[in-house]
Image (cartoon, helix red, strand yellow):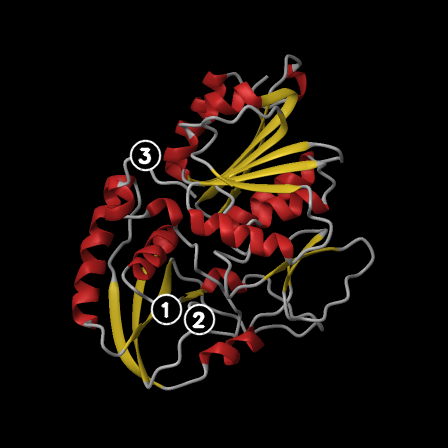
């Protein structure tokens, strides 16, 4: 993920561009549990914020920037069509348009001041086309628990697509025939691949990768898209992120997976200074940032190559499409999940098989 500008001002004010970096979801019926940056203390304070689904990632990031030791997300949409690994059916959950995000703070933090700051920052999201809705807050104290181990039992292997399954690093998991596994350590990951934007990016990679490609992963975050690209047969993957922490985390996750020596991670601001010609460029970042990289992407994508973009809320879709088409791309695939959009654009002279042709 990348800041909306290069001077860091917006990142300090509202770090929209690194949203959901420390967010991990664990399905346990009506609740999700996560703990990162583990510490054991006598007491914790819990702040729960209920916002519209479109504001989930931004609100999560705000809570973490204000010192949360992790966040939990309760989203009714995660239960749609969910069936257990042994065929058990989960209870029906009433679908609502809001999500509850719970943050955890040490007992010495002024939780009322945190709540006020959260409210101020959420109000500013409208400047970026994100509506948090009528926000509700709740706080409570938690007794000492061994967070470092208890949460692990709630994180299980998750089938993301037809071929790809994300597996926690400590789990013994036997893949079925043809199944490809991505091992992540959620104690250090910025996401587990369960968000719609990541899922659609993975679907798109499955669509375009046939083996032997060069891939550029812009805003790599946890490195999940780079790892998936390697598993799907890409020859060389170059992953970039403006955040040095993300670069380190991505490398650590890459090292958890076999045969990933072909992934090269580096600090970088979008595609600035990159001169590698790629068959595929994939970017799961904010729409306002995507439009700033489409010209560079066209410069770097080989003829008949692809640009995959995700992280696009619905009211930004036309803007992103226009930017890509103005750069010279043609739309081949458009995916929608809820309010999120993803797309596959192609650099080609043969426009007979593309949507924009």
User: Does residue 330 appear anywhere in the picture?
Assistant: no
Pointer 2 residue: 35
Q: Quadrant of residue 180?
A: bottom right
Q: Eyeballing the image, is 79 above or below 6?
A: below
Q: Secondary structure at mark 3?
A: loop
Q: Quadrant of residue 353?
A: top right
What's the mark number on residue 69? 1
Residue 316 x/y as whole percent: 38, 34
Q: Secondary structure at mark 2?
A: loop
> Real-space Cα distance between discs 2 and 1?
7 Å
Residue 18 x/y as whole percent: 39, 48
Horizontal arrangement in the rendering, residue 135 relative to residue 175 (left or right):
left
Horizontal arrangement in the rendering, residue 328 relative to residue 126 (left or right):
right
Sort mark 1 into few (<14), some (14-19) or many (20+) by Cα contacts within 10 Å: many
Pointer 3 residue: 6
What's the mark number on residue 338? none
> Real-space Cα distance between discs 1 and 3?
27 Å
Sort mark 2 into few (<14), some (14-19) or many (20+) by Cα contacts within 10 Å: many
| 273 or 209: nearer the viewer | 273
Q: Answer yes or no: do the residues labelled 2 and 1 have beta carbons within 8 Å?
A: yes
- The residue sitting at 24% across, 53% down in the picture is 122
What quarter of the picture does the N terminus occupy?
top left
Query: Which sits earlier in the primary sequence, circle 1 or circle 3?
Result: 3
> Real-space Cα distance between discs 2 and 3?
31 Å
- The residue sitting at 56% across, 22% down in the picture is 300
Q: Residue furthest right?
A: 177
Horizontal arrangement in the rendering, residue 76 relative to residue 235 (left or right):
left
Q: Eyeballing the image, is 278 above or below 98?
A: above
Q: Secondary structure at mark 1?
A: loop
């Amino acid at each position: 993920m990348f800041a909306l500008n290069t001077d860091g001002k917006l990142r300090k004010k509202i770090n929209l561009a690194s949203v959901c970096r420390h967010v991990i979801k664990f399905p346990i019926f009506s609740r999700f549990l996560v703990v990162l940056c583990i510490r054991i203390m006598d007491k914790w304070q819990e702040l729960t914020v209920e916002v519209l689904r479109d504001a989930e990632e931004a609100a999560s990031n705000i809570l973490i920037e204000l010192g949360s030791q992790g966040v939990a997300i309760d989203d009714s949409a995660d239960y749609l069509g969910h069936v257990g690994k042994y065929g058990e059916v989960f209870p029906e959950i009433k679908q609502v348009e809001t999500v509850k995000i719970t943050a955890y703070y040490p007992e010495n933090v002024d939780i009322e001041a945190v709540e006020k700051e959260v409210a101020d920052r959420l109000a500013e999201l409208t400047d970026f086309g994100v509506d948090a809705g009528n926000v509700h807050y709740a706080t409570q104290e938690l007794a000492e628990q061994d967070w470092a181990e208890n949460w692990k039992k709630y994180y299980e292997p998750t089938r993301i697509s037809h071929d790809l399954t994300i597996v926690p690093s400590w789990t013994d998991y036997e893949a079925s025939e043809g199944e490809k596994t991505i091992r992540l350590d959620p104690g250090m990951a910025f996401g587990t691949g369960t968000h719609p934007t990541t899922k659609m990016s993975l679907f798109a990679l499955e669509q375009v990768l046939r083996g032997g490609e060069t891939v550029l992963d812009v805003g790599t975050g946890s490195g999940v898209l780079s790892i998936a690209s390697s598993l799907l047969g890409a020859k060389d993957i170059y992953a970039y992120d403006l955040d040095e922490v993300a670069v380190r985390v991505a490398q650590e996750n890459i090292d958890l997976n076999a045969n990933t020596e072909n992934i090269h991670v580096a600090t970088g601001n979008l595609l600035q200074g990159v001169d590698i010609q790629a068959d595929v460029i994939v970017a799961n970042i904010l729409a306002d940032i995507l439009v700033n990289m489409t010209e560079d992407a066209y410069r770097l994508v080989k003829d008949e190559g692809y640009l995959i973009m995700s992280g696009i809320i619905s009211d930004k879709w036309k803007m992103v499409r226009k930017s890509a088409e103005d750069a010279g791309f043609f739309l081949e695939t458009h995916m929608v999940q809820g309010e999120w959009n993803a797309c596959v654009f192609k650099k080609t002279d043969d426009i007979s098989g593309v949507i924009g042709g």
